[in-house]
Image (cartoon, rainbow, N blue to C red):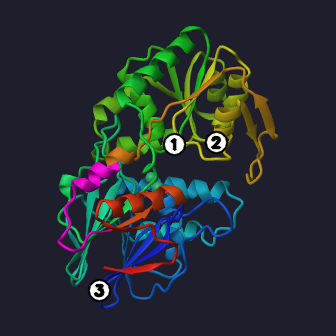
Amino acid sequence: MVSISFLGGCREVGRSAILIESKSGAKCILDYGIRFKNENRLPYDTNLSNLKAVALTHSHIDHSGALPFLYKTYEGPFFTNPVSLAIVEVLIRDMIKISDFPYPFGFRELEKVKQNANFLKNKVRYKIKDNFFITFINAGHIPGSVSILIEVDNKKILYSGDINTQLTNLINPANSLDIPELDALIIESTYSLKEHPDRDQLEKNFVEKTTDITENGGSVLIPAFGVARSQEALLILDKYNYPGKIFLDGLARKVSKVYLDYPESIRSQGIFKNALKKTKFVIRRKGRNIAKNSVGVIITPSGMLKGGAAIEYIQTILTDPSSAVYLVGYQVEGSPGRGLLDNGIFEFSERGLKKHTIDNIKIRAKCEYDYFDFSSHADNLHLYDYIDNLNFYDNSNDIFCVHGDNRSTTSFASELVKKGYNSVAPEIGEVYKV
Ligand SMILES: [Zn+2]
Ligand SMILES: [Zn+2]
């Protein structure tokens, strides 16, 4: 029997971590992320003796953020790909630098993560140990993202990681046809209860509204995650020939440069290069002042207005009735972005930041504000489609629903039970045998 221990990402989005153990006791960890609330930010504490490998689905911090902690004691290989490693370094450095939380690791351990990195190509089976293999398969979520197929003691287990089966402008989608017959599936549930709007219509609407604002002399602030979402917003504006100026600020600049260095991780380097050529990279305070005083679009983290360069622009934009704030990512309950969408009031507290640049602010928006759901996760229809297209061996169709809030994971599992699967939403620390 193979054991699967769920160390995080159980009935929550955050600290994704899964431990696979073979009959002989050899162990492999898939993802080792962090969560940003409460005191328990790391995955569930468990015995990691005989750990033979660590493998990463993608660079987002909820999957990668606690990797340095493993390297306090572990010295074995870390399987990833070049673009994920480069982004992991950018994100973890930033996380350690700006946080007041006393993470039990630092730059030294991050260095060890890098030193032990082994790059895997997609669809190439790699042997970790006798009768223990891993294979990366494109997951379509962000550049470099993969699902991981584990073959251990003649069982096949697929961990989806975060997946998107729909084509975006930045990357190619996941395809369940790439996946062999399975014994078990561990799948994300983020949007298992939600349907995304029609993407083409949404993109056109977004560019039309943006163009209207800037042609009438206003500016559009697009708070977006620096990893992938900022670049996707840029590509959408380019695709529909947005005529005005575009500024890119904060972490989004650094990440864009990394994507250019790894053209195999994106759909078209040519199109991306071209879009970046028309974009002004905001450098230092001088550049920011130019962006602030120009008419155009400013794309900058953070995506939920929790901090980052977006805070530098937002006061000017919110008080200008001719401007707009267009949010392009999920806004978690309690975030300043969610507050703006729900109540028209932007509230920001600098608590938790080491570098104080501005005081606490509370502003009622005079400008327009809206939300465009440019998600990079499969929604409910596409999650069920993905599962329907998979093949399971007779009498073994276990599906574990992870990476979603309590309702999304548990109702996803009960729906799958109704469809004849053997499905659960595991709780943290639980161990299952397949
Ligand atoms: Zn992700
Ligand atoms: Zn995630």
Task: Give left or right: position of 168 versus 312.
Answer: left
| Quarter of the image where one finds residue 267 | top left
Q: Residue furthest right?
A: 359
Mark nearer the viewer, 3 or 1 = 3
Q: Position of residue 169 (x, y in %)?
A: 34, 34
Question: Residue at position x 43%, y 54% from top?
Answer: 86
Range covered by the magenta-colored residues: 383-398
Residue 384 position (above or below residue 367): below
Are circles 3 and 1 on residues that touch, CB within 8 Å?
no
Q: Amino acid at mark 3?
A: Met
State which quarter of the image contains the N terminus. bottom left
Q: Amino acid at mark 2?
A: Gly
Question: Residue at position x 50%, y 64% from top?
Answer: 9
State which quarter of the image contains the C terminus. bottom left
Of callouts 3 and 1, the N-terminal one: 3
Q: How far apart are the two marked residues, 3 and 1, measured between alpha carbons?
A: 42 Å
Q: How far apart are the two marked residues, 1 and 2, measured between alpha carbons?
A: 10 Å
Residue 430: within the magenta? no
Circle 2 — which element?
loop
Residue 403 position (above or below residue 150): above
Are circles 1 and 2 on residues that touch, CB within 8 Å?
yes
Of callouts 1 and 2, the N-terminal one: 1
Can you tell which mark lies on residue 1? Answer: 3
Task: Give the labeled residue for mark 2.
Answer: 308
Question: Residue at position x 20%, y 59% from top?
Answer: 179
Of callouts 3 and 2, the N-terminal one: 3
Q: Amino acid at mark 1?
A: Gly
Circle 3 — which element?
loop
Task: Give the labeled residue for mark 1.
Answer: 226
Q: Is residue 38 visible?
A: yes
